[in-house]
Image (cartoon, rainbow, N blue to C red):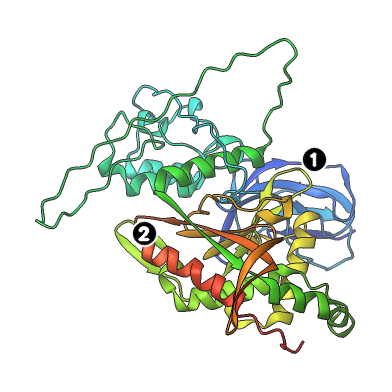
Amino acid sequence: MTATVVQMPKLGESVMEATLTKWLVQVGQTVALDQPLVEIATDKVDSEVPSPFAGVLTRQLYAEGDVVKIGEVFAELNGGGAGTTPVASAPKIEVESVKSSDEMPSTEPPFIPSAAPTGAPSASTGFLSPLVKTIIQKEGISDHELSTILGTGLDGRITKEDILGYLKNRGNISSGSAQGIVSTPKIQEASQVTTASKPIPAASKPAVSIGGGDEIIEMDRMRKLIAAHMVMSKQVSPHVTSFVEADATEMVKWRDRVKDEFFKKHGEKLTYTPIILEMVAQALREFPGVNASVDGDRIVLRKNVNIGMAAALPSGNLIVPVIKNADQMNLIGLTRSVNDLSLRARTNKLSPDEISDGTYTVSNVGTFGNVMGTPIINQPQVAILAVGAIRKKPAVIETSDGDFIGIRHMMFLSHSYDHRVVDGALGGSFVKRVADLLEGFDPQRPI
């Protein structure tokens, strides 16, 4: 029977290679269609590559720890038809290195390894991919320095991005400091006098006493990465949160009136989320300073409006699928994207490209009955919006005949932003604009 090859699949727009971390099938073993062949790790995602057909594994062309480029053949099987060379389908996501954003922040600081003696990288640093090893050797990073770098990869492994991030700030970090220590930026005063930066000591872990009836649960890999990402975000960005209460009555009434007809006409369930995302996308176009990232002392204004929506998984973890070019979609397109991404997030069927390149994030804390929240920024973005529950409340209604008290559908919008580049005027004006768009919703809007 002719051997059939399996190639490393496309893993996202900017991912060109992956580290083969574990073989799940050994030579001589039978593999079923869509059965995972290997576990892989990239700078964006840890995942499994499924077999594109059933057969017997005859060759492993790479060992565990090797780096495989996208499109390269890494396995051969007997089966799947003579002369064919099917490519494995996109892997299912288990974790992402830049995990979600918001409602469940971790209070535990990242683990900072103790310093090791200076010299070549040792086994104490854990698994290092060949690419990472090359960078370490080229840049002359000692084992002592390596031990201070917080790994964000699988099981705490140090990734290429971790190394590059360390090198970027290497000159500002003393030899005994850790990556988890944030240096105070230099501040330019009106007199042009610059204050030298000083490292801020990393917080130590609090002592935890455990009683006889306490239950101990180990964090899974996704939760560890979420925790590390949340702590990193709070260390990197000085968070400020602005709150606005919006009258969403016209939007609620319109949606209640047209949702059945919308479903019959377009085959999609209409929720509040795509309506709100439509308004957020418009506001991001009007306030480009919020649709941005920080690169050292440079502000990167993003051309595309790619809105991430934090979604809760059945496991209790969070993931952020991204709607690309959301400002170019109408309500029907946004509704389809929201429903599709939400469903596939819950069933673990997102592709790596669908969780990358977000420029702004929206989290619906109202799903859990919360009226407001203080979300944590999803780095490297500079802002995030939390949408609270819509509740009926008595409110003052202003008319030409005077003011009246009426029952209105009210909701809070909570906008957290990076005060390094987004001041109160910009951050507050943005969320106020979203509220104005909600309150100015056209109740006669066609579907």
Residue 71, can we see it?
Answer: no
* Quarter residue 70 falls in: bottom right
Picture mark count: 2
Percent of width and height locating residue 88: 76, 61
**Looking at the image, is 164 positioned above or below residue 429?**
above
Q: Residues within 10 Å of mark 1 (few under 14, many from 20)?
A: some
* Quarter residue 277 falls in: bottom right
**Looking at the image, is 341 positioned above or below residue 75?**
below
Relative to 259, is 241 on the left or the right?
left
Pick the residue in front: 392 or 147. Answer: 392
Q: Amino acid at mark 1?
A: Gln
In the rendered view of the protein, which quadrant contains the N terminus? bottom right
Return the mark for residue 199: none
For this orientation, the residue located farthest to the top is: 212
Residue that appears at 52% across and 65% down: 359
Pick the residue in front: 230 or 119. Answer: 230
**Looking at the image, is 130 positioned above or below residue 208?**
below
Percent of width and height locating residue 308: 61, 63
Residue that appears at 36% across and 22% down: 117
Q: Residues within 10 Å of mark 2 (few under 14, many from 20)?
A: few
Residue identified by numbered label 1: 26
Q: Amino acid at mark 2?
A: Asp
Pick the residue in front: 104 or 431. Answer: 431
The label nearer to you, 1 versus 2, is: 2
Percent of width and height locating residue 58: 81, 48
Residue identified by numbered label 2: 295
Percent of width and height locating residue 307: 59, 67
